[in-house]
Amino acid sequence: MRMIFTLAVSAVMLAACGGGDAAQKKGREAPLVTLAAVQPTRFVERIDAVGTARANEQVTLTAPVTERILRLNFEDGAYVSKGQVIAVLAQGQESAQLAQANARAREAQQQLDRLEQLRERGFATRSAVDAQQALASQATGQAAEARASIGDRVIRAPFGGWVSLRNISAGAVVSAGTEIATVSDVSRIKLDFAVPETLLGQIKPGQAIVATAAAYPDQPFRGTIATIDPVLNPQTRAATVRAILANGDRKLKPGMLLTVAIEAEARTSLAVPELAVVGEGERSFVFTAQDGKAKRVQVRTGLRQNGMVEIVDGLAPGTRVVTEGVVKIADGQEIRTGGSGNATPKAAAKTGGKAG
């Protein structure tokens, strides 16, 4: 009797354990995932570079001679027009030399006129007239030299632009070569940047670029490629490319460092969200949904832009791939797709059954 009772209890316990395992297996649900269809997406080949902004025209005006400054006709950062007087150096000695040269030139010309009249009447020789002609020309040349010397002491803007901060004052004696002002035409900006020789085939003059400055991170500055240097740097194996950017608001300053993006080539390719791609070394995989199960598929990827990954090979248009939940599934595993009906928790479903 004891043996029969013990066997009966053992059978009951085994039955209970077996029932619990069955209930646990029955209670497991397939992982909940989100699917997205493979669809065509526009991708743009981009070349990224870093460039330096330069003024459209820029010149540093210096003193041509050692002299005292009489006047400075500009304010810090002011705009000056072409030909406007920037500074005037002392020119008293040169003015006196000009007056003397003019007087000699007038006297020589008057003497020449008298000799020509005498020659017409036969009282002067041709050689005398020629000699006086040489003296008159010499006096005229001396006057022109004095005027040029005075002109060198009047410094003018060679083109319209904005002047730099003033670091000298009227009355100071400057030596030859001393900087007086820098004039910059920043109505447009020349942006110089380097492009490796391997990418030169993807760019050409007239191509659009987008530049960004650290001072204005949310404002793109658009321009076009103007020139490609025909000579490469032998150390870097890169060519300097110059683009032109409009700068009507003068936000860009010469010397600024800008990041450059060149749209080299656009194409439409199949793509999936970045979350769908799983990398293993140099290989990439996605999980597709087929008959309620996950299937691991190897793909060849290309560009990554705006949260999408270009699929070069491995998937057909319209194929549904797992985007969210890839870390929870394995090849061949059953899956549930996200949705109001499929996402209902198991506990809630049991409660509803009991209530019914």
Image (cartoon, rainbow, N blue to C red):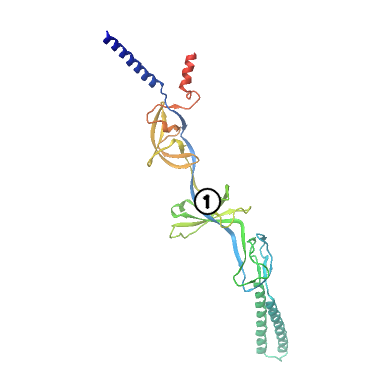
Q: Looking at this view, name the residue that lies furthest to the bottom.
A: 123
Residue at 33 percent across and 15 percent down: it is 13
Residue at 65 percent across and 68 percent down: it is 155
| Whether residue 319 is visible | no
Residue 179, x across and y down, in percent: 61, 67
Residue 122, image quadrant? bottom right
Residue 83, image quadrant? bottom right
The residue at which mark 1 appears reads as 259
Residue 183, x across and y down, in percent: 62, 62
| Vertical position of residue 270 compared to residue 345: above or below | below
Relative to 74, 351 lies left or right: left
Residue 60, x across and y down, in percent: 60, 65
Asked whether 263 or 113 is in front, the reply is 263
Q: State the SS at label 1.
A: strand
Residue 151, x across and y down, in percent: 66, 72
| Vertical position of residue 229 compared to residue 43: above or below | below
Residue at 29 percent across and 10 percent down: it is 5
Q: Local crowd at mark 1 within 10 Å, few (<14), some, or many (≥20)?
A: some
Report the amino acid beneath label 1. Answer: Thr
Q: Quadrant of the N terminus?
A: top left
Asked whether 201 or 354 is in front, the reply is 354
Q: Looking at this view, name the residue that lies furthest to the top.
A: 1
Relative to 126, 199 lies left or right: left
Number of numbered discs on residues: 1
Relative to 31, 125 lies left or right: right
| Whether residue 115 is visible | yes
